[in-house]
Image (cartoon, rainbow, N blue to C red):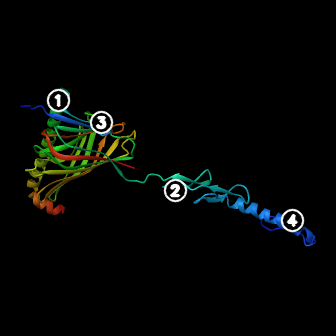
């Protein structure tokens, strides 16, 4: 069973298409990209949590805020 | 000797002898013939004439070829090939596949690039990202307005290593189909690049959209675009169409 991620490179000038296993550098970049995506989601979630805390403090629900903001 | 007012053709004087009438008529006729030919030098169907720098003498302009238009060059009319009109030229079509799909060797012969991605899907839920010219440096930013079923939010990122342009998922999941429209105005200039992003992902009656602007700090022309699911997974569907625009 082959589990190595594959990459596709399409040359728009010649129409040549290469599909091959990702090399070590590309695999490492994929790990970095996944880590970056997780960090970004965590940051967005933290902002949402902070926003919810503020709404709770002033006694509004998210739906009520949505109504106010139109 | 009397002459005509406009072209100066020689005519007999009132006192000229009648016996010289035939010669006078020949002289006048010859002058009229010469002038007429000078004013009408056309020889071929479709020829036109225009005034030359010599008085009473026109210049022949032969008919152009099919598709040519009349223009002015160096102060005189001429035929020229019509300038190419604006419009889109499809440069490439390729299917999304694998963990990353790159379109390389993108022509630099156009003013703008337009990228359309239709019905992209991934093996798992993920952000949908792009990277340009194989540059993995922190040279990207984005400022996007996100709308999901009437709820709005903003995404702002600077110094990122890629551009998150949307959301993709498998066909059985919620955001099951991403359609992306990217515009790269003036993509070959030596200044930083701006990308207009419009993405819509849908599942059932729910629409998730992202619109806004991304930037890429580079002085190089954009010659390759990599598309990848930033959270991992493998593309399971979707086509990338790249157009050049003039």
Residue placed farthest to the top in the image? A24
Mark 1 vs mark 4: give the one in front: 4
Question: How many angstroms separate mark 2 from mark 1 (CA)?
Answer: 57 Å
Q: Residue at x 25, y 48 (%)?
A: B143
Task: Tell me the quadrant of the picture where the C terminus of chain A can be found.
Answer: bottom left
Residue under numbered circle 4: B23
Q: Which mark is residue A28?
A: 1
Query: Of residues B86 and A13, which is closer to you in this image?
Result: A13
As helix, strand or loop, the secondary structure at mark 3 comes to: loop
| Residue in the image at 20% along x and 28% along y | A25
- Compared across the picture, whether B66 is left or right of B161 comes to right
Q: Please check whether the numbered discs 3 and 1 fall on a single chain.
A: no
Element under label 4? helix
Rounded to the nearest angstrom, the CA distance separating label 3 from label 1 is 18 Å
Q: Position of residue A3 (x, y in %)?
A: 9, 32
Disc 2 and disc 3: Cα gap in Å? 40 Å
Seen from the viewer's position, the closer of residues A18 and B104 is A18
Residue B11 appears in the picture as rendered: no
Q: Position of residue B209 (x, y in %)?
A: 19, 54
């Amino acid at each position: 069973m082959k589990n190595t991620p594959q990459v596709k490179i399409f040359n728009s000038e010649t129409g040549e298409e290469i599909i091959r296993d990702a090399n070590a550098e590309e695999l490492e970049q994929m790990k970095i990209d996944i880590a970056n995506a997780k960090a970004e989601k965590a940051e967005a979630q933290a902002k949402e949590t902070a926003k919810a805390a503020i709404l709770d403090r002033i006694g509004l629900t998210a739906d009520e805020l949505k109504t106010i903001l139109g | 000797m009397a002459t005509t007012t406009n072209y100066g053709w020689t005519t007999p004087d009132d006192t000229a002898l009648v016996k010289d009438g035939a010669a006078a008529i020949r002289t006048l006729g010859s002058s009229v013939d010469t002038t007429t030919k000078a004013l009408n030098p056309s020889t071929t169907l479709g020829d036109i004439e225009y005034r030359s720098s010599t008085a009473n003498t026109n210049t022949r302009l032969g008919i152009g070829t099919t598709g040519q238009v009349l223009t002015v060059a160096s102060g005189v009319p001429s035929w020229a090939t019509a300038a190419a009109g604006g419009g889109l030229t499809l440069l490439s079509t390729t299917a999304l596949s694998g963990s990353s799909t790159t379109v390389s060797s993108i022509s630099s012969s156009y003013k703008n690039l337009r990228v359309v991605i239709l019905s992209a899907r991934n093996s798992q839920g993920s952000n949908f990202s792009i990277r340009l010219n194989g540059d993995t440096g922190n040279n990207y930013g984005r400022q996007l307005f996100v709308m999901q079923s009437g709820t709005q939010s903003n995404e702002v990122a600077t110094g990122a290593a890629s551009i998150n342009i949307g959301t993709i998922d498998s066909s059985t999941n919620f955001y099951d189909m991403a359609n992306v429209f990217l515009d790269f105005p003036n993509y070959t200039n030596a200044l930083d690049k701006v990308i207009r992003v419009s993405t819509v992902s849908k599942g059932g009656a729910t629409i998730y959209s992202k619109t806004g602007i991304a930037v890429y700090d580079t002085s190089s022309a954009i010659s390759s675009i990599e598309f990848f699911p930033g959270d991992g997974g493998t593309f399971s569907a979707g086509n990338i169409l790249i157009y050049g625009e003039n």
